[in-house]
Amino acid sequence: MEITGAVLVGKLTVIGLKSVGLGATALPGKMAIKIDPNLLSVVDQRCKKKIIITGTNGKTTTTNLIHHILSSQYKNVLSNLKGANMEQGIASAFINDTKKEYDWGVFEVDEGSFQAVVKHIKPDFVVITNFFRDQLDRYGEIENTSAVIYEAIKPLDTTLILNADDPMVAKFKELHKKCVYYGVEENELSSKNQRIVESRFCPICSHELDYEYFNYGQLGKYHCNNCGFQNPDYDYIFTNIRAGPDGNLCDIDSRGEIFKDIHFNYGGIYNAYNCLAALTSCLEAGMDASKAIERTENFEYHLGRMEVMEFPDKTVKITLSKNPIGLSEVLKSITLDKRKKALLFILNDNPADGRDISWIWDADLDNLHQIENMKYICCSGRRAEDIALRVKYTNISPDLIKINDKMRKSIENVLKEDVEIVYILPTYTAVFQARDIILSHLKNRSSFLLNIKELVEKLKT
């Protein structure tokens, strides 16, 4: 197989990073693209079919689930699974798995990089999950983000897989592409009023939308009394949702064909949308529905997004929380968990997180009052005091709040708490570091217990 100079440099970068104990998600691709700015065109040519997933929340989970489902039928599926979703991240995925041909390319693409990526990679499907405020210092308001992607899709010959419950996404039907719509019907977690609605106005005529119910954020059943804009008819819809902290059980109406009691291992209505986006994509790609559902039900996700780690005395759950809607929905899902618990917020303001942390004041932290059996709330990270102040203004008892800006020490402390489950809610740049710290403690405790067990066995003999 021909290895270009750009790919060779990327591979050498991977080797160099590994030799000093560093992972490689974006730097190899960055180096390679500097040498060959058209490297993503090579990726495009080698993938028979391509799916691009974009939007604010849920991209990484949806991408990983699509990859997991398609891999059961196709041998070669190329994906950037670790959340490195700019041009260099996709290039790095290719450098790490260089093949002459792929059955599918499944790529998560950052909203700000979408325009640059689709200049090279021509997708057969574009999945748009939602539009929320995120990293305002980088993206601006959601209307700006939506407009950039809208203009980039205009010249593409592609099928759009759209979240019909987000008016900012449903607007893309104006592009007159082939559109496939998915959504989630009203359920026990829906509400008639929503405190955080990113866009209350019709994206067509700017009049205020009338909502029958909200699922989360501005996602729900809407109608414009001025121009008639409303949810498109669903091609795929989740119905009969039974939500829990550790998963959702629901039925799916797939173009009139009903599949009952689908179990997805991750809780929260936002995860129901992620799951349905992935199933919709795979079914539209030609997957057998029963096989796709089976793969959905055995999906396990790691890398700090809803990742569960089992310690001998407690469960630890890491859930990325990086914008108002995301954090609000995570806290809402925790309210379903009745176990004795501790929470650890880790708030950073590194460039990849967004320097502007004002979003924590838009998040609905009043959900904290609905969480039962809370023993401890720790606030950590570069902006530990800021998130602690935000928690304080919810009128949570000051006795519950502890501050430690040292992430490692905070994790060590919370792991010692006498609780059944610890929820760790980091922003983007804290996810992998927090995960590594927790894994090291898990390994050490497991080794210690194993040694104790071996000692007991020896004493018995």
Image (cartoon, rainbow, N blue to C red):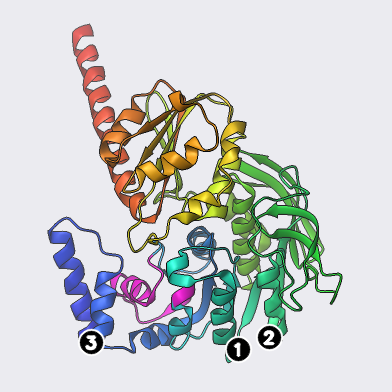
Check whether the beta carbons of the residues at disc 2 and disc 3 lie within 8 A of each other: no
Numbered mark located on residue 154 in the image: 1
Magenta span of residues: 84-112
Q: Nearer the viewer, residue 108 or 131?
A: 131
Query: Is residue 105 shown to the viewer in this render?
Result: no
Crowding near the residue tagged with mark 2, few <14, some 14–19, many ≥20 C-alpha atoms within 10 Å: some
Query: Is residue 410 shown to the viewer in this render?
Result: yes
Check whether the beta carbons of the residues at disc 2 and disc 1 lie within 8 A of each other: yes
| Residue displayed at 82% across by 63% down | 256
> Which amino acid, mark 1?
Lys
Task: Using residue 344 as the reference point, say whether residue 182 is left or right of it.
Answer: right
Residue 87 lies in the magenta-colored region: yes
Crowding near the residue tagged with mark 1, few <14, some 14–19, many ≥20 C-alpha atoms within 10 Å: some
| Residue displayed at 54% across by 59% down | 58
Instruction: Compute the Cα span from label 3 to label 1.
Output: 29 Å
| Residue displayed at 72% across by 83% down | 174
> Which amino acid, mark 2?
Leu
Which quadrant of the figure has residue 159? bottom right
